[in-house]
Amino acid sequence: MNTNGTVLIVDDEPVGRKTLKALLFTEGYDLAFAANGPEALALAAELNPDVILLDVMMPGMDGFEVCRRLRAMPDQAEVPIIMVTALDDRAARLEAIEAGADDFITKPFDRVELRARVQAVIRLNRYRKLLQERTRRREAEEEARRQENELLLLQEVKRLQDEFISNASHELRTPLATITLISGNLDALYDKLDDDRRHKMIQDIRKQARALNQLIDGVLDISRLDQGRISGERHSLDLAGLVLEEIERQRPLAEEKSHRLMVAVNGPLPVWGDAGQLRQIVRNLLNNAIKYTPAEGRISCQSRIFADNLAADPTWPGSDQLPEGSWVGLRVVDNGVGIAPEQLTRLFERFYRVQPQSVIPGTGLGLAIAKELTELHRGRIAVVSQPGSGTTFAIYLPVADA
Ligand code: ADP
C-alpha cells in the first residue's frame, strides 16, 4: 500500500493503461485500472480514489457519460477527474467541462506535465477533504453545544415553573388561612361578640378575599405569559391616550391619600401593541407609586420621545442603555418610601416584595408582570430609587412607524 493516494486509470485500450502505469508507478500511488465505464463506476465506489484519469474515447459508455454519472453519485460528486483527450480536441474539452471534469491532459502524454497535474489535483483534493472534515467536526460540535444549551434551558424552565407553583401555592395559602381562622372564630364565638367586633372580622375576611382575588389574577397572568398565551392583539396605538385614561382611573386612589398628581403626557406617542397589556403596565406602575408613597405625596407621570440623536437623560433611568432607534419613554416619579440599592436588583422577580409582611397589600407580581409585558412589546423597563426620597420607574417602547 502506497501513501501518496489512489489513482484510478480508466481506458479501454490496454496500451493506454500501460502507458499511464509506466508514467505513474514510480510516484508512490496506488494504481487501479478499469477498462470500461461500468467497471470505472464500480471501482470508484469501492476505492474512493483521490483522482480519476478518464479517457474520453471509449466504446459503449464514453468518458463524458462516466464523468456525468460519477458526479451524480453522492460519494463521488467531488472526486477530482482529469479527462484524457486527443491533442487540440477543443470540442471534447468543452464537453468535458460541461460533464464536470476538473482538468485535462492530452495524448501523447508529456511525462512532467502529467505527474505535475496529478500531484496538484491530489493535493487540492486533500485540502478539500481536510476542510470538509474540519467543517463537519465544527458543525457536530456546534450541534452538540446547541443541544446541551437547549437541555439546560428546558431544565431551567422546569425549575422556574416548579418554583413558581410552590411560591404561588404558598402565597395563596396565607390569605386563605386567615379567612379560615377568622371565619372559624366568628362561627364559634358569634354570640359572645358585639356587633362592632363581628363587623371588623367580616371586613378582615373581605380584605383577605380581595387579596386572594388579586393573587389569582396575577398568577393567571403570569402563567398565561409563560405559556405564550398573552400574545395579545397588536395595533398601532397612541400610548398617551391609554396613559391618560389609566391616570383618571387611579385618581380616586391618589385622592384618598391626598397625593398631588402631576401629568405631563403629550401625544401622539405612537406605539405598536396590545391596549389592555400596555394599560396594565401603566396601571401597575401608577398603583405602586400611590401605594408606596405616604399620604400627601407627589406623584408625576411624564412622557418623552427619545430619538436617535437625542442624548440620554440621567433623570430617565435606563435612557443611556437604549439601543439605536426612536423610543417612546414614559416615567412615573414618586417621592415615596424608596427602595434600597441592594433590593433594586430583585424588584422584578416574581413574588418579590421589599417588605414581605408589609401592611400595604400586594402580591409581589405587579412589577414582574409589567416587565414581562414591556419586553413582550420589545420595550425596556428601568428604575432608580433613593430610600426615603422616592422612586422613578421608566418604560421605553419602540416608536411605531406611521
Ligand atoms: P406588590 O404587589 O408587592 O406591590 P410589585 O411587584 O408591584 O408587587 O412590587 C414589588 C415590590 O417593589 C413591592 O412590594 C415594593 O416593596 C417595591 N416597590 C414597587 N414599586 C415601588 C415604589 N414606587 N416605591 C417603593 N417601593 C416600590
Image (tube, rainbow, N blue to C red):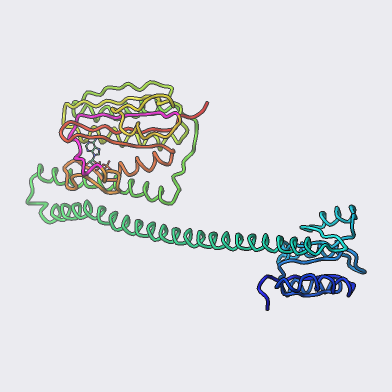
Ligand 1 lies in quarter: top left
In the displayed structure image, the side of residue 232 where residue 221 appears, left or right: left
Looking at the image, residue 148 lies above or below residue 356: below
Does 331 appear in magenta?
yes
Q: Position of residue 251 (x, y in %)?
A: 27, 27
* Closer to the camera in the image, 169 or 312: 312
In the displayed structure image, the side of residue 194 where residue 324 appears, left or right: right
Q: Position of residue 256 (x, y in %)?
A: 20, 29
* Closer to the camera in the image, 402 or 312: 312
Total labels drawn: 0
Locate residue 196: give its quadrant. top left
* Closer to the camera in the image, 271 or 224: 271
Q: Position of residue 123 (x, y in %)?
A: 67, 62
Name the residue at 26% across, 34% down: 384
Question: Which residue lies most toward the bottom here?
Answer: 1
Q: Which range is magenta?
A: 326-344
In the displayed structure image, the side of residue 243 where residue 18 appears, left or right: right
Name the residue at 15% across, 52% down: 182
Name the residue at 17% across, 47% down: 357
Locate residue 158: give its quadrant. bottom left
Q: Position of residue 72 (x, y in %)?
A: 77, 62
Locate residue 380: give its quadrant. top left
Does 327 appear in magenta?
yes
* Closer to the camera in the image, 49 or 13: 13
Name the residue at 14% across, 43% down: 199
Looking at the image, residue 247 lies above or below residue 210: above
Instruction: Indicate the quadrant containing the N terminus: top left, top right, bottom left or bottom right.
Output: bottom right
